[in-house]
Amino acid sequence: MSEEAQPTTVSEAPRASAGIFRGLSGKLLLLTIVFVMLAEVLIFVPSVANMRIRWLQDRLNTVAAAAVVVDGLQNVELPRNVQDDTLMATGTKAIVIRRKDASRMIAAADMPAEIDGEYDTANFTAFAAIRDAFDTLLFGGNRVVRVYGPLGESDAVIELVMADASLHKAMLVYSRNVFFLSIIISLITATLIFLAINRMLIVPIRRMTTSMQEFSNDPSNPARVLVPPEGRDELAVAGQHLASMQRELQRTLKQQKSLAELGLAVSKINHDMRNILSSAQLISDRLAAVDDPVVKRFAPTLLRAIDRAVGYTREVLSYGRTTEAEPHRRFVALKPLVSDVAELLSIDPQSGIEFQIQVQDDLEVDADSEQLFRVVHNICRNAVQALTNHEAEDGRPRMVSVSAMRMGSVVTISVDDTGPGMPPKARENLFAAFRGSARSGGTGLGLAIARELVLAHGGTIALVEKPTPGTLFRIELPDRPVPLDAFRSKARH
Ligand SMILES: Nc1ncnc2c1ncn2[C@@H]1O[C@H](COP(=O)(O)OP(=O)(O)OP(=O)(O)O)[C@@H](O)[C@H]1O
Ligand SMILES: [Mg+2]
């Protein structure tokens, strides 16, 4: 089955997406970038608040260093130009040192009328720090704020009034840096995760999907079976299962192919066999007219056997299949049927094999008589063959016995022999077509046919263990269920 021979399968099979962001790996790459960016945002929020507080503390510390010096020069007012040029250069508008008893204005320049915010760099909550940071970031830049904090280790407080433009600018620069850093980190992380996932997941998954596609295009080609991956992780185990499933499927396909071929061969043989048997039927019809006592004795059996054979072949041909036809059930007297089987088996009197029938004359089985005949015939024939091929042991009778009894609506038929017993090979493949034969010249179909026919009657067939040597088969055949309405109307009349 080549690819050219099956173009539809190739085009219909869904294929893994080829575009980089449509495949699983591309999606994973995008998702990783998005998630790392999200994580960076979560980290950014507290870190920008922290940066702002530190910036303000630094500013306070710088100013405090100068202020302490000025404060030391008691009663000295800084010259105006020094105040403006040095302390005020950074946007600071006023510097005050507050003590418990007194406050001192160290420097002041064009004090604005209004202060937009007040911040204590020593006492603040995390929430307030975050809120103030975003407030400055989004709306700051043109405000004047008052910032205060402890003056070194002393009780004094240093306070300064300043424009927040430089703070705003520093925060913008910080945010931009964090943003670019986040992009770089997420790209590196995403690439590393992508490479790892690609190696661990995508490559094995792709190998499996490719194998599935190739296998479905050409399932009978052994080269298309996946080479099972090694390892114990989930994907390796899935791959190993896939490979064994493909091998199993291939075996089944092969078996089905040979069964289909066999079916065709059987039909052809069956067809020609019917023709030959029909001729034999015509000739044996004439035998019945011969006036010889020996011929007269055997002719009816021969005729019935040929009639049966013609019947089977016709049935198989008319159904055009190798499975059995539906049973046509009616109540059949079992004893004459078993006698017919015994007669057809034509056991050689020299062989010393005895065929016993322990069935009551009035025992009837609800079955298709032809199919029941075939079941009993196959099982009894096996028993006779086993006994014939087996050397007689001293003192042991060579016997096949068929017994039956009815219990309520179930008839149990037992076929017991004193032969060698089931060989292990036949036991392992009991009832499996073509596999169960353990004797030369056997096809291994007899028991499989018997089982199929019994199952079609809703019955069971089993090999029963017994204490003495030999083989015992037990068949249970239930009557057809009686429809309640029919039963009631029958009971009324
Ligand atoms: N009564 C028995 N005693 C010993 N072995 C038996 C008996 N019945 C069946 N077997 C074993 O079971 C195997 C399977 O039987 P089955 O009837 O399915 O196939 P077969 O007899 O080999 O071939 P065929 O298709 O011609 O009947 C036989 O080959 C035989 O070895
Ligand atoms: Mg057989």
Image: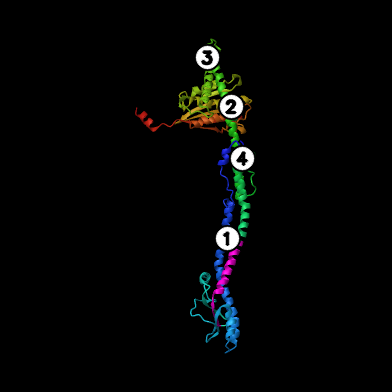
On the image, the x and y values in percent for residue 84 come to: 57, 82
User: SS at mark 1?
Assistant: helix
User: SS at mark 2?
Assistant: helix
Packing grade of label 4 (10 A; few <14, some 14-19, many >=20) is some
Packing grade of label 2 (10 A; few <14, some 14-19, many >=20) is few
On the image, the x and y values in percent for residue 473 come to: 54, 30
Amino acid type of the residue that numbered disc 2 sits on in the rendered structure? Ala
Amino acid type of the residue that numbered disc 3 sits on in the rendered structure? Asp
* Depth order, front residue of 358/77: 77
Whole-number angstrom distance, CA of label 3 to CA of label 2: 30 Å
293 w.r.t. 118: above or below: above
Q: Where's the N terminus, which quadrant?
A: top right
162 magenta-colored: yes
User: What residue would you read off at disc 1?
Assistant: 36
User: What residue would you read off at disc 3?
Assistant: 285
Q: Which quarter of the figure has residue 56?
A: bottom right
Packing grade of label 1 (10 A; few <14, some 14-19, many >=20) is some
User: What residue would you read off at disc 4?
Assistant: 247
Residue at (56% x, 70% y) in the render: 171
Q: First in sequence, mark 3 or 2: give its number.
A: 2
Q: Which quarter of the figure has residue 480?
A: top left
Q: First in sequence, mark 4 or 2: give its number.
A: 4
Region in magenta: 155-184
